């Protein structure tokens, strides 16, 4: 529950207390009084709680995952047989554009952002992020952006230029519907979410760690997410520029990509891929972080070579900036550029390989427990390795000129993004579900979920290696019998296999959704520490209290929680349990802080975010509407500026006399 | 859009645990946040400047940079903007000394200098337009107006921040630490000034 | 300590079997793939061969590493799964092992890098060119323009489309550009792909060892009919190439008076010549008929139809001009006979009448082309692709008869 927390000196924090009576704010600062709802939809709409926002990110991302997945299935239906008639050319082009856009910007990124929001403060022993209201604003921007991008389906057709939206094909003549305009504005708005999120999380990680938690004692998920936030911080402004140029051209007649006026179409490609390649690591590093948490927990030993994993992550983050042109080997860059980027791309394979080695060695000599989370993590190691190795074949630029823009590269990046990013996210779902909802996802359904996804994923994307090497280009709404060939490697057979695989994959994901429903209906509560976990987020109740920790733990070890539960027997060098999770938690409660000031809910993040799509629609359809949007934005800024983030005692009426003497501290929320 | 919003809110934001314990780095959250934001802004202007440098010679049938730039005029307005950094420093110093009157005075002067610069830019745009360089005239036109326009918007946002600071300072309604907020705006203002120095050099002074 | 969950027993080895299978099939591919016409592992010329020689060892090494990693993971799963053993010692890593395992892949990649470097520069050479052809992409077809090169008998520019004709065993240099959006030229058997970018000229080396026909496909997404933008490269022996060149430059032969074809010529002059050039075609008043595609087509050009029936395809190589049996006869001819069969061109008995008539009847119906009249306002009334001309069936009869004379 979102709370307006009133400090009451002299009382300790009770572990359980009934909800406090409604508190009325007496002051308006700029425009409106503060929202006060602690229950119901209003408590979600105006919340600034990082955990609620994390869940909202997750729910939004899951919705768009389903949308993007259905788009993918339609694509596979269309390509199951030659001369497919499920979609026409126009619709097919919209479909693959929106599939990629949705999966990249509206599923993987926000899902990772959701995990980051929820777990970074918990993992570093903080009570919230550095800027809670900006955090809320970021979420609403993401949602607004997702809505704007998808609105185009109902307003004359979605964007149809591919997610890479190469100029000049994205220009007003070549893409006459408004789809590209919606796409550009939607991504611009979603970009605000990424940028504000990046600043917020970096400050949180750098400034708000629990005492004793040095950077090299930070949980690895937090580390990887921090690298991701730095990538976002510097990548988002580049795509912002590119999208502005595109929108200015389409909406105001600027000439940036007008070849007749002398424009160079490669400008867009450079801007896009300077953003786009770090973006690949933005997508995959969160999952690397997740399985680097999961593997040690279920191997019962620390991550092998923690500093190597940290520095290889950082190295990937750095070198990732120097390889963008490997997406342009066929663009005609000239041999010198091609050679340099080819070598740089090979170089980035090394730190990536380090990660695979470390994960494998983490399992080595362990005591492996194959929960669903662990299965997804191990699945990631193998599938990502395949994707990584096909990536190495792409780094050989001459070879890449044969395989790029064929299904071989579709296979490659789906092994990286599905086998890598999405398997990691699923590992995270199963691992952290009890922490977020207090209930364990059903393991039996989870096992089916995993195996169907593994089989479906390999059946869908495995054959694409063959299709690509047999010369089937991507982004074709139809393929023909005449170019399909005969024999074992004919395109017809493997296209059909891939399409059947996509159905199996869909079933696997459907089982996950069923699992969510089954779990939600179940009455069984999860134990406090179901996995025998290692890091700080598990030193809280399930789900955590509003203020996360009753007292901020002092950190002495990497894997602090594990070391509070176990000690090494100096004689035998074996680990023996010295405290249960419940005892560790009780210890924190005993030392509970007296004053816990939590940030207060606010209308302004939502109001501000609502202004942005209004401006976008205004620019596309009618400028006066944009002015209305501008007024909304100014109004929200005014209200925001004058409202302190944390409500002070003087902001409220005296509590009614029959009320409780204590103060409201959230105990749990569902 | 992204830029405007964030610049605006960062100085006003306050931390969740602001009073519970000191930060790990010693830098306040807002200050660190502003630094990160400015880092991001470097890439934004980097992209815009690159675009301009690529296209500055591509004038189609429109006027060339040499034909329309009025270097003495722009030099004067650049000097005005540069001076505003000085007054900003004085405002921050006053804020540290808890000298409210001084703070407000120097903030107002900074805002006025900034407004003079923006006024000069509006005049310059009008003059260029009358000389035949529209937004859609040529690649040079599109990229010139986009780059300098983005910078102008940044200055304008800065002016709004300065005046808002003066207003809420007068009503003693500053959320968070006052000198910190002034410093924050100062960081932003100096950044925008530095970017202008780069733009002025690359766009106006270096010949095509 | 034991997990508090009822953990399903995992057969994780299956993961590995699957992935081994995937990697294994990749490796097998190299040895026996002879299937689709655009197979990237079947080089038919020195440039493609250079790429293939470079990539085969890379694929092999990648496959082996994949198998090793999978095997190690599989072993670890089997060896270390929880059988009730105590919680292991909390070791944090072995830097020496770590560094070794980092250096080994770095060294492998360094070796690959050296060879890659060489091939990149070899493939960029232009100084050994023997024949230059300008290739221009346009939504959704390619134009081939042979500039005057007397040593090849090309004394006036030859402008063609649909099929690129080159002499076998000769180092050809394509100079690529585009009239609208970015396209990419790719004949996998002869070389990797190279984008055709408007406002820029990119070069691509092409050389075929043997006479034959080699399939390709536009590989940069270029809008609605991207999937239908195909190409075919035809390699002829130098002697056959000379014959082809001579024929392309032969003077125009008007159809016999009173023939159906003659009436077709009239239809052509009334309708088609607005965009499509036929070199030497004269109007009734004796003046040369000059097409003005730039006034009618947004991207500025339409295929030159002068020797239409010497090509085997039309509409951007989306359709064959030969019916299936005749097409197979040419495609499957061995290299000795190929030239004769190809140079025979298309006659009435081999003509793919149904597709050609459907095209003439209503082109946008058989090939997606932004034909919506409402969009013409965006393009100053110019068409994007061939519009529906509203020809009558008898006009189509006449036109087909006329087109058959263009060879």
Image (cartoon, helix red, strand yellow):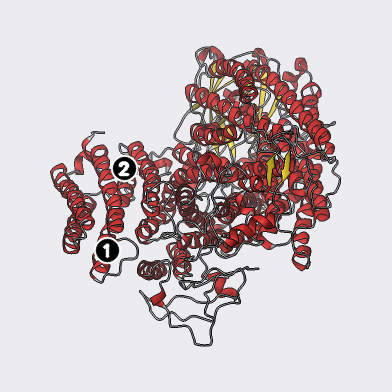
Q: Can you give x and y, in whole percent of width and height, for residue C2 in the image?
A: 80, 47
Q: Residue B193, image x and y in percent?
A: 25, 47
Above or below A626: residue C365? above
Dot 1: few (<14), some (14–19), or many (≥20) neighbours within 10 Å?
many
Q: Nearer the viewer, mark 1 or mark 2?
A: 1
Q: Position of residue C112 (x, y in %)?
A: 62, 18
Pointer 1 or 2: first along the chain = 2
Graded by Cα atoms within 10 Å as few (under 14), some (14 to 19) or many (20 or more), the crowding at tag 2 reads many
Seen from the viewer's position, the closer of residues A25 and A88 is A25
Image quadrant holding the C terminus of chain A, namely: bottom right
Q: Disc 1 designates what residue?
A: B165
Most extreme residue toward the front is: A571
Judged left or right of residue B135, residue C277 is right
Q: Are marks 1 and 2 in contact (CB under 8 Å)?
A: no
Q: Residue at 71% x, 16% y: name it.
A: C210
Question: Looking at the rendering, in which quadrant would you find the N terminus of chain A?
Answer: bottom right
Q: Quadrant of residue A461?
A: top right
The answer to whether one can see residue C43 in this image is: no
Chain that bears disc 2: B
Q: Which residue is mark 2?
A: B140
Q: Secondary structure at mark 2?
A: helix
Q: Are marks 1 and 2 on the same chain?
A: yes
Q: Chain of mark 1?
A: B
Mark carried by residue C61: none
């Amino acid at each position: 529950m979102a709370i307006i927390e009133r400090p009451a000196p002299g009382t300790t924090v009770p572990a359980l207390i009934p909800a406090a009576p409604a508190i009325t704010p007496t002051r308006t600062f700029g425009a409106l009084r503060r929202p006060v709802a602690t229950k119901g939809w209003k408590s979600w709409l105006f919340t600034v709680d990082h955990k609620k926002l994390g869940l909202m990110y997750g729910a939004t991302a899951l919705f768009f995952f389903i949308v993007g997945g259905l788009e993918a299935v339609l694509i596979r239906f269309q390509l199951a047989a030659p001369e497919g008639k499920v979609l026409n050319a126009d619709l097919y082009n919209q479909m693959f554009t929106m599939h990629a856009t949705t999966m990249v910007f509206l599923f993987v990124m926000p899902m990772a952002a959701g995990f980051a929001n929820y777990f970074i403060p918990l993992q570093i022993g903080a009570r919230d992020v550095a800027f809670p209201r900006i955090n809320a604003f970021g979420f609403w921007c993401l949602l607004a952006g997702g809505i704007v991008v998808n609105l185009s389906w109902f307003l004359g057709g979605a964007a149809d230029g591919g997610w890479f939206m190469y100029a000049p094909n994205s220009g007003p003549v070549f893409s006459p519907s408004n789809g590209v305009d919606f796409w550009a504005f939607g991504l611009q708005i979603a970009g605000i979410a990424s940028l504000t999120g990046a600043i917020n999380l970096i400050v949180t990680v750098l400034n708000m760690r629990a005492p004793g938690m040095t950077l090299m004692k930070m949980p690895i998920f937090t580390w990887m997410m921090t690298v991701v936030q730095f990538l976002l911080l510097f990548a988002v402004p580049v795509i912002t520029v590119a999208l502005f140029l595109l929108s200015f051209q389409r909406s105001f007649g600027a000439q940036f990509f007008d070849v007749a006026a002398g424009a160079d179409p490669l400008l867009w490609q450079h801007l896009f891929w300077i953003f786009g390649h770090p973006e690949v690591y933005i997508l995959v590093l969160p999952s690397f972080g997740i399985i680097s948490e999961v593997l040690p927990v279920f191997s019962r030993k620390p991550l092998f070579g923690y500093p190597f994993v940290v520095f290889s992550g950082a190295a990937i983050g750095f070198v990732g900036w120097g390889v963008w042109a490997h997406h342009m080997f066929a663009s005609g860059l000239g041999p010198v550029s091609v050679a340099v980027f080819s070598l740089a791309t090979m170089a980035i394979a090394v730190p990536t390989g380090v990660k695979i080695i470390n994960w494998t060695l983490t399992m080595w000599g362990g005591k492996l427990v194959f929960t669903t989370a662990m299965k997804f993590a191990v699945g990631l190691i193998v599938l990502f390795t395949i994707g990584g190795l096909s990536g190495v074949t792409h780094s050989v630029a001459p070879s890449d000129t044969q395989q790029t823009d064929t299904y071989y590269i579709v296979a490659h990046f789906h092994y990286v993004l599905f086998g890598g990013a999405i398997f990691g996210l699923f590992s995270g779902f199963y691992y952290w579900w009890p922490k977020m909802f207090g209930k364990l996802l059903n393991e039996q359904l989870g096992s089916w979920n995993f195996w169907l996804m593994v089989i479906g994923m390999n059946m869908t994307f495995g054959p694409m290696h063959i299709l690509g090497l047999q010369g089937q280009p991507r982004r074709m709404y139809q393929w023909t019998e005449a170019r399909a060939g005969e024999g074992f490697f004919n395109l017809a057979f493997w296209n059909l296999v891939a399409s059947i695989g996509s159905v199996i994959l869909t079933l696997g994901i459907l089982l996950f959704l069923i699992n969510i429903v089954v779990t939600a209906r179940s009455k069984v509560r999860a134990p406090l520490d179901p996995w025998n976990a290692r890091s700080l987020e598990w030193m809280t109740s399930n789900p955590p209290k509003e203020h996360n920790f009753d007292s901020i733990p002092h950190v002495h070890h990497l894997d602090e929680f594990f070391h509070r539960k176990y000690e090494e027997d100096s004689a035998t060098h074996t680990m023996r349990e010295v405290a249960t999770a419940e005892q560790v938690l009780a210890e924190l409660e005993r030392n509970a802080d007296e004053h816990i000031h939590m940030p207060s809910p606010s209308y302004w993040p939502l109001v501000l975010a609502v202004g942005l799509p209004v401006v976008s629609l205004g620019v596309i359809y009618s400028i006066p509407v944009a002015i209305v949007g501008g007024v909304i934005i100014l109004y929200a800024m005014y209200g925001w500026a004058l409202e302190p983030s944390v409500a002070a005692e003087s902001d409220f009426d005296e509590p009614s006399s029959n009320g409780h003497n204590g103060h409201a501290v959230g105990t749990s929320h569902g | 859009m992204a830029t405007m919003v964030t610049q605006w809110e960062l100085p006003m934001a306050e931390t969740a645990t602001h009073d519970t314990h000191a930060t790990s780095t010693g830098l306040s959250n807002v200050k660190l946040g502003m630094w990160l934001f400015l880092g991001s802004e470097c890439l934004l202007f980097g992209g815009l400047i690159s675009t301009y440098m690529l296209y500055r010679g591509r004038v189609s049938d429109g006027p060339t940079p040499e034909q329309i730039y009025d270097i003495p005029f722009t030099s004067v307005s650049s000097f005005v903007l540069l001076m505003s950094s000085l007054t900003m420093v004085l405002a921050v110093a006053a804020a540290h000394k808890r000298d409210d009157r001084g703070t407000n005075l120097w903030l107002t002067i900074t805002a006025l200098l900034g407004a003079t610069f923006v006024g000069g830019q509006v005049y310059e745009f009008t003059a260029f337009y009358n000389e035949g360089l529209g937004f859609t005239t040529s690649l040079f036109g599109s990229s010139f107006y986009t780059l300098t326009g983005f910078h102008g918007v940044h200055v304008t946002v800065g002016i709004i921040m300065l005046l808002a600071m003066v207003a809420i300072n007068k009503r003693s309604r500053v959320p968070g630490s006052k000198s910190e907020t002034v410093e924050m705006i100062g960081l932003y203002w100096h950044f925008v000034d530095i970017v202008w120095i780069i733009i002025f050099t690359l766009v106006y002074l270096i010949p095509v | 300590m034991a997990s508090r969950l009822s953990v399903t027993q995992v057969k994780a080895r299956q993961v590995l079997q699957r992935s081994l299978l995937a990697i294994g099939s990749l490796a097998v591919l190299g040895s026996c793939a002879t299937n689709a016409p655009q197979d990237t592992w079947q080089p038919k010329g020195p440039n493609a061969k250079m790429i293939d020689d470079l990539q085969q060892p890379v694929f092999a090494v990648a496959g082996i590493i994949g198998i090793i990693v999978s095997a190690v993971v599989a072993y670890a799963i089997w060896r270390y799964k929880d059988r009730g053993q105590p919680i292991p010692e909390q070791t944090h890593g072995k830097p020496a092992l770590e560094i070794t395992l980092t250096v080994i892949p770095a060294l492998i990649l360094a070796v690959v890098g050296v060879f890659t470097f060489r091939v990149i520069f070899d493939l960029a050479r232009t100084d050994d060119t023997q024949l230059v052809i300008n290739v221009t992409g346009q939504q959704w077809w390619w134009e081939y323009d042979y500039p005057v090169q007397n040593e090849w008998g090309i004394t006036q520019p030859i402008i063609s489309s649909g099929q690129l004709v080159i002499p076998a065993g000769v180092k050809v240099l394509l100079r690529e550009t585009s009239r609208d959006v970015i396209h990419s030229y790719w004949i996998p058997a002869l070389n990797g792909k190279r984008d055709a970018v408007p406002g820029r000229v990119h070069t691509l080396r092409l050389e075929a060892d043997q006479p034959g026909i080699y399939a390709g496909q536009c590989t940069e997404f270029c809008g609605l009919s991207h999937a239908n933008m195909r190409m075919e490269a035809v390699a002829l022996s130098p002697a056959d190439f000379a014959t082809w060149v001579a024929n392309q430059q032969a003077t125009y032969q008007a159809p016999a008076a009173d023939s159906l074809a003659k009436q077709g010529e009239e239809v052509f002059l009334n309708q088609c010549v607005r965009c499509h050039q036929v070199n030497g075609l004269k109007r009734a008043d004796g003046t040369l008929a000059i097409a003005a595609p730039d006034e009618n087509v947004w991207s500025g050009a339409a295929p030159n139809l002068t020797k239409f029936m010497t090509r085997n395809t039309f509409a951007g190589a989306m359709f064959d001009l030969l019916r299936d049996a005749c097409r197979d006869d040419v495609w499957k001819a061995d290299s000795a006979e190929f030239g004769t069969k190809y140079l025979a061109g298309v006659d009435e008995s081999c003509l793919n009448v149904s597709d050609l008539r459907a095209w003439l009847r209503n082109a946008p119906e058989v090939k997606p082309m932004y034909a919506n009249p409402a969009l013409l306002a965006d393009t100053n009334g110019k068409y994007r692709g061939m519009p529906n001309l509203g020809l009558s069936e008898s006009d189509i009869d006449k036109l087909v008869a006329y087109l058959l004379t263009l060879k």
